[in-house]
């Protein structure tokens, strides 16, 4: 899992925190930290600005205000930022403050973007040492504390009710491929297989793609926190993946996964498919017999098969507390 830092770099007792949420998608990382901070009487402020994307906080201000009321944080424009310790995602907003800046990596995006912000931040939080090794950044700025994104208390009964789904049914969750990759995927073949196995199919498309997937239940991005993909995965018995980095979510939530290797480039995080819980099927082997063999194998695997991969490459939950402990806010 990487080293657990024991040295406190700051002696100051922080009682306020800032979060640059220049995209609503950042909230899935920030809100768990805010909740943990509330438990320690640390006041949080979410800083916002406009962008031209579907996840612009200004465009989604009502949703953000509802989250503010629920989780007790302030909302301010970035121009009003003070010098309290400030958390960022992928260094976004690092040039807007002179405060202590702590950047959190976002999936695998950091592998391409880290050079743009590394000199402008004070610390970078990686899920584990393994992730830092990809960019050979294991220096004093690098902290291996996990990811607050997974510090969620997901209640299955509440999720079934929220999405009007019946708990007695068996669900397969299909986070749909990007629109550009649809021609690489035979969804009809996959859906027929799942229906034959008795599954109801839940699909979800990202807000930037905004198309329906033809499953039994189809959803678009609607809930920024908790994120609907995490909630829908939680109540599902099986996940169908298309080389998305959601393999990390599958492992953290201990969900068996069938991955269809469709990307025209090198697969990201291939080590995470090595466990007994996963099938990694190349496009030239898409046939019912092969798929059934993989399905029977992974469904027979014990839940304990996730643990070695979590220990070697990922982390245990509780990252929010570890992060705040590190910055001496306990």
Image (spheres, helix red, strand yellow):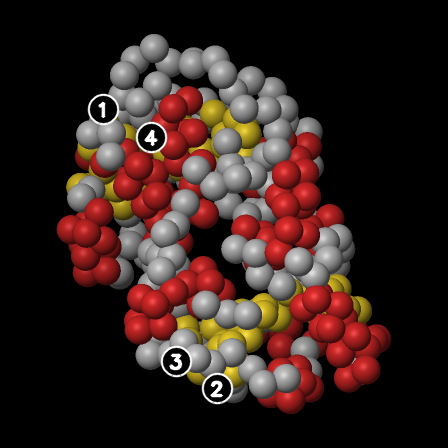
Distance between the alpha carbons at the discs numbered 1 and 4: 12 Å
Residue that appears at 72% across and 53% down: 275
Q: Which mark is residue 15?
A: 1
User: Could you say where residue 59 lies in the image, as x and y percent from the top left?
Assistant: 26, 61
| Distance between mark 2 and mark 1 Cα atoms | 47 Å
Quadrant including the C terminus: top left
Q: Provide the secondary structure element on which disc 4 rests.
A: strand
Picture coordinates of residue 101 (x, y %)? 39, 27
Question: Vertically, is 214 above or below 255?
Answer: below
What percent of the width, then of the height, locates residue 98? 33, 23
Contact flag, marks 3 and 4 (Cβ < 8 Å): no
Q: Quadrant of residue 14?
A: top left
Name the disc covering residue 216, or none.
2
What residue is at 26 percent from the left and 25 percent from the top?
84
Q: CA distance from mark 3 to mark 4?
A: 42 Å
Name the residue carrying label 3.
166
Residue depicted at x 41% and y 63%: 231
Q: Secondary structure at mark 2?
A: loop
Q: Residues within 10 Å of mark 4 (few under 14, many from 20)?
A: many
Earlier residue among tags 2 and 4: 4
User: Cβ–Cβ below 8 Å for labels 2 and 3?
Assistant: no
Residue 217 position (above or below residue 90): below
Closer to the eye: label 2 or 1: 2
Q: Nearer the viewer, residue 105 or 271?
A: 271
């Amino acid at each position: 899992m990487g080293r657990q830092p024991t040295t406190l770099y700051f002696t100051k007792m922080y009682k306020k925190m800032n979060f640059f949420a220049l995209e609503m998608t950042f909230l899935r990382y920030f809100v768990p930290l805010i909740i943990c901070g509330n438990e320690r009487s640390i006041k949080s402020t979410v800083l916002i600005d406009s962008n031209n994307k579907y996840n612009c906080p200004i465009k989604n201000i009502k949703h953000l205000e509802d989250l503010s009321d629920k989780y007790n944080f302030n909302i301010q424009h970035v121009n009003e930022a003070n010098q309290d310790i400030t958390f960022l995602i992928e260094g976004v907003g690092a040039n807007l403050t002179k405060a202590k800046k702590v950047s959190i990596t976002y999936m695998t995006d950091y592998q391409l973007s880290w050079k743009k912000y590394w000199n402008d931040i004070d610390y970078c939080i990686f899920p584990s040492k393994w992730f830092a090794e990809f960019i050979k950044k294991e220096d004093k700025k690098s902290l291996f504390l996990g990811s607050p994104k997974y510090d969620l208390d997901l209640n299955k009964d509440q999720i079934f009710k929220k999405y009007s789904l019946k708990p007695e049914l068996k669900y397969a969750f299909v986070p749909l491929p990007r629109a550009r990759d649809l021609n690489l995927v035979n969804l009809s073949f996959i859906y027929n297989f799942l229906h034959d196995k008795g599954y109801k199919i839940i699909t979800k498309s990202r807000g930037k793609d905004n198309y329906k997937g033809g499953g039994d239940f189809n959803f678009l991005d609607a809930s920024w926190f908790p994120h609907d993909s995490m909630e829908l995965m939680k109540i599902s018995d099986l996940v169908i993946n298309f080389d998305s980095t959601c393999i990390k979510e599958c492992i953290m939530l201990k969900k068996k996964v069938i991955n269809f290797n469709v990307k025209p480039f090198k697969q990201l995080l291939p080590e995470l498919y090595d466990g007994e819980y996963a099938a990694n099927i190349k496009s030239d082997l898409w046939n019912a017999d092969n798929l059934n063999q993989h399905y029977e194998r992974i469904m027979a695997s014990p839940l304990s098969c996730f643990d070695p991969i979590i220990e070697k490459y990922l982390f245990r939950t509780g990252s929010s507390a570890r992060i705040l402990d590190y910055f001496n806010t306990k």
